[in-house]
Image (spheres, rainbow, N blue to C red):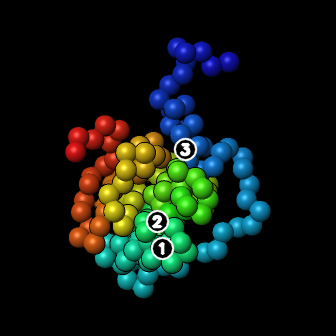
């Protein structure tokens, strides 16, 4: 039994990662399709992919936001906004890309990963990135480096 005294930051992070990935032990009906990787893996091509996700979301009638999670030189998670299509106010592109990356890797953390987003992450998405262990946030066409995610960023 976990008592308040034995509850640690590790438990909190594991719980947040499980939440972000859609729950512990949740199996999908089918494996996700492989992620198409850019020919030249670099920050401009990763951001271009985030904007492609943004365009796809907009084309499908949702809000125009997109994001990708990159670890090393590979895109490990991707998503466009699904807020309107899923009728889910938490279905932001960044949060869904984090969930996708965790599900695809089977990991509990995204330590060392970079989250590329078509726009600046909202506080909810930045907190999810923080708890998932994302190391750096980059957003917008200018690829603004927001640094490591924080829980209480002063704007």
Mark 3 Cα-neighbour bin, 10 Å: few <14, some 14–19, many ≥20: many
Q: Residue at x 55, y 47 (%)?
A: 20
The CA span between labels 2 and 1 is 6 Å
Q: Which residue is mark 2?
A: 63
| Badge 1 element | helix
Give the quarter of the image for residue 52.
Answer: bottom left
Q: In the drawing, what numbered circle is on residue 58?
A: 1
Q: Which residue is mark 3?
A: 17
Give the quarter of the image for residue 121.
Answer: bottom left
Cβ atoms at labels 2 and 1 below 8 Å apart? yes
* Figure check: 90 above or below 53: above
Residue at the limit of the structure toward the bottom, as seen here: 39
The first of marks 2 and 3 along the sequence is 3
Mark 2 Cα-neighbour bin, 10 Å: few <14, some 14–19, many ≥20: many
Q: Residue at x 72, y 46 (%)?
A: 25
Q: Position of residue 80 (x, y in %)?
A: 50, 67
């Amino acid at each position: 039994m976990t008592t308040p005294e034995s509850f640690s930051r590790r438990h909190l992070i594991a719980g947040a990662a499980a939440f972000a990935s859609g729950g512990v032990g949740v199996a999908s009906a089918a494996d996700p399709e492989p992620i198409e990787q850019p020919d030249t893996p670099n920050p401009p091509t990763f951001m271009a992919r985030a904007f492609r996700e943004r365009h796809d979301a907009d084309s499908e009638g949702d809000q125009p936001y997109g994001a990708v999670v990159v670890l090393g030189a590979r895109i490990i998670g991707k998503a466009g906004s699904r807020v309107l299509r899923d009728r889910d106010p938490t279905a932001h592109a960044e949060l869904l890309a984090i969930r996708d990356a965790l599900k695809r890797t089977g990991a509990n953390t995204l330590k060392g990963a970079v989250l590329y987003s078509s726009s600046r992450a909202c506080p909810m998405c930045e907190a999810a990135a923080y708890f998932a262990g994302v190391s750096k946030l980059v957003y917008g066409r200018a690829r603004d480096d927001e640094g490591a995610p924080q829980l209480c960023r002063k704007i």
